[in-house]
Structures are given as structure tokens and as C-alpha cells.
């Protein structure tokens, strides 16, 4: 089945220790998104890739970065995690044809714990 | 900017009860509207969608109609089951910049009991 896969499902890191979360997709979608979701809150968009073009949200901290080496994979790097970065991180994809608006397909998420 | 307002939860219902979760939106363009569902510890799953005024989205017994005159997209189900217990997010998708983006409501937790 075509899908969005996130690894690992659970990640524990230490305060200040860099961590990378990964997302892969078999949908061949051209747009990939990263969201942060804290407990009992709506997902908050951090950034997205439209093809190879990176688009950062204005309020995303510099501590968060992303890489998309090819269509299928996208990584979220947190350079120096703080306790406030503990959250569920969701990857999503969409097939964007350049006009109009489109649904997004989400992965299962990675729950990050910072100790 | 765009925004979505959902009714506060939790909503607690008995099995086979009728469900309504209210959702209203504010948007400058002509958004598409969505309901996503999130089960505990999982990502979001698309439940249903509507792309233009008067469209009705439906899936798994859930329905919602895109009402432009009242800027609403209320979620309904005639008879809920325990397995419907989850958090439901109303969202709109509009194009700003390079790609379409989702604006979510705060989510409504539904608890269905026997």
C-alpha cells in the first residue's frame, strides 16, 4: 500500500543532543510537510518542501532544520533539543498541481522525548 | 488570516447516539475543507473532504456539508460506535505562497461509551 512512513515511532534524546527524525513516502507526492504537535493541541506547521524548494514558516525556530535528498525522503533535524521540543512530530505529503488546494496524507508520527 | 473554530470537547456520547461536532471557518479565498481523525498515539487520517460550496463529504457513516453562507462544515454521524472514540480536527486548505497549507481547528475529543 502507498503510504507515509516515519521512523522511529518513539525517540528519546538528551537535552542539547542533536536528533534526526525521518520520513519516507511511496505516494510519489511532490510536497512534504513537517508538523509539531504538542499534547492536546492542533498540529503546527514547521516547514515544507515543494519539490526541492524549502519553505520555512516565519515562527519556526532556527533550531529546526530539514533536508530532502530525493522525492521519497525528508528529514527533520533538531540541532539542540530543549525540553520544550518534546512533542509528536508529524510528516505529511500532498500531490500539489500548482492551482487550488489539496488534502495532505499523514504518517503515524514520531513521539520525541527530551530528557 | 485563515482560521478554524471548533466546538470544545470532550464530547461524551453513548453508543448509537447522534453526533454533531460544529466547525466554522474564516478564509479570504475559496478553501477546501476537511475533517481529520486522530486515534491515540497515531497520526492524522483524512476522514472526509469537500472542495466547494454545497459539496457533501462522507465516509464511514460520517458526513459534512460545505456551507458557504454560514461558513460552516459541521461533522455528523447518525449512530456512533465505541471505535469512533478519537480526536477530530476540522481543517481548511488554502493556497498561500508556493503550496496549499492546512489550518486546523483545536480538535474535539469524542468519547463513546457502551
Image (tube, grey):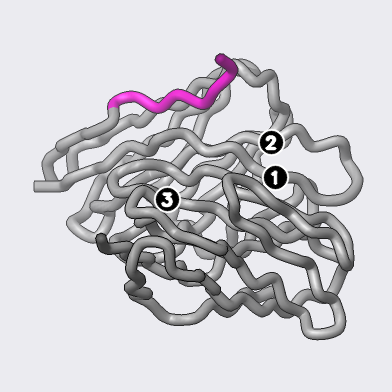
Residue at point 17% right, 45% down? A113
Q: Residues within 10 Å of mark 2 (few under 14, many from 20)?
A: many
Q: Secondary structure at mark 3?
A: strand
Q: Residues within 10 Å of mark 3 (few under 14, many from 20)?
A: some
CA–CA distance between discs 3 and 2? 18 Å
What subunit carries mark 2? A
Percent position (x, y) of residue A100? 87, 50
Quarter placement of the N terminus of chain B: bottom right
Residue at point 46% right, 26% down? A23
* Residue A80 higher or lower than B2, as above or below: above
In this figure, which residue is indicated by the disc labeled 3? B38
Residue at point 53% right, 54% down? A45
In this figure, which residue is indicated by the disc labeled 2? A94
Badges 2 and 1, same chain: yes
Q: Is residue A37 magenta?
A: no
Q: Which residues are magenta?
A: A1-8
CA–CA distance between discs 2 and 1? 6 Å
Depth check, mark 1 against mark 3: the one in front is: 3
Looking at the image, do the residues carrying marks 2 and 1 touch, with CB atoms under 8 Å apart?
yes
Q: Secondary structure at mark 1?
A: loop
Looking at the image, do the residues carrying marks 3 and 2 touch, with CB atoms under 8 Å apart?
no
Amino acid at each position: 500500500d502507498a503510504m507515509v512512513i516515519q521512523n522511529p515511532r518513539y525517540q528519546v534524546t538528551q537535552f542539547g543532543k542533536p536528533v534526526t527524525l525521518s520520513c519516507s513516502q511511496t505516494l510519489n507526492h511532490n510536497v512534504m510537510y513537517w508538523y509539531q504537535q504538542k499534547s492536546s493541541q492542533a498540529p503546527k506547521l514547521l516547514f515544507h518542501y515543494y519539490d526541492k524548494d524549502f519553505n520555512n514558516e516565519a515562527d519556526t525556530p532556527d533550531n529546526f532544520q530539514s533536508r530532502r535528498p530525493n522525492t521519497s525522503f525528508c528529514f527533520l533535524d533538531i540541532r539542540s533539543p530543549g525540553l520544550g521540543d518534546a512533542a509528536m512530530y508529524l510528516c505529511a505529503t500532498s500531490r500539489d498541481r500548482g492551482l487550488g488546494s489539496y488534502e495532505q496524507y499523514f504518517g503515524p508520527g514520531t513521539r520525541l522525548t527530551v530528557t | 488570516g485563515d482560521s478554524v473554530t471548533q466546538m470544545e470537547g470532550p464530547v461524551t456520547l453513548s453508543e448509537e447516539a447522534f453526533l454533531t461536532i460544529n466547525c466554522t471557518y474564516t478564509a479570504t479565498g475559496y478553501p477546501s475543507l476537511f475533517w481529520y481523525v486522530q486515534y491515540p498515539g497515531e497520526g492524522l487520517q483524512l476522514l472526509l473532504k469537500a472542495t466547494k460550496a454545497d459539496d457533501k463529504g462522507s465516509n464511514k457513516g460520517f458526513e459534512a456539508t460545505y456551507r458557504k453562507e454560514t461558513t460552516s462544515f459541521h461533522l455528523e454521524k447518525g449512530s456512533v460506535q465505541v471505535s469512533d472514540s478519537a480526536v477530530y480536527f476540522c481543517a481548511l486548505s488554502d493556497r498561500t505562497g508556493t503550496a496549499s497549507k492546512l489550518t486546523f481547528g483545536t480538535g474535539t475529543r469524542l468519547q463513546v461509551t457502551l
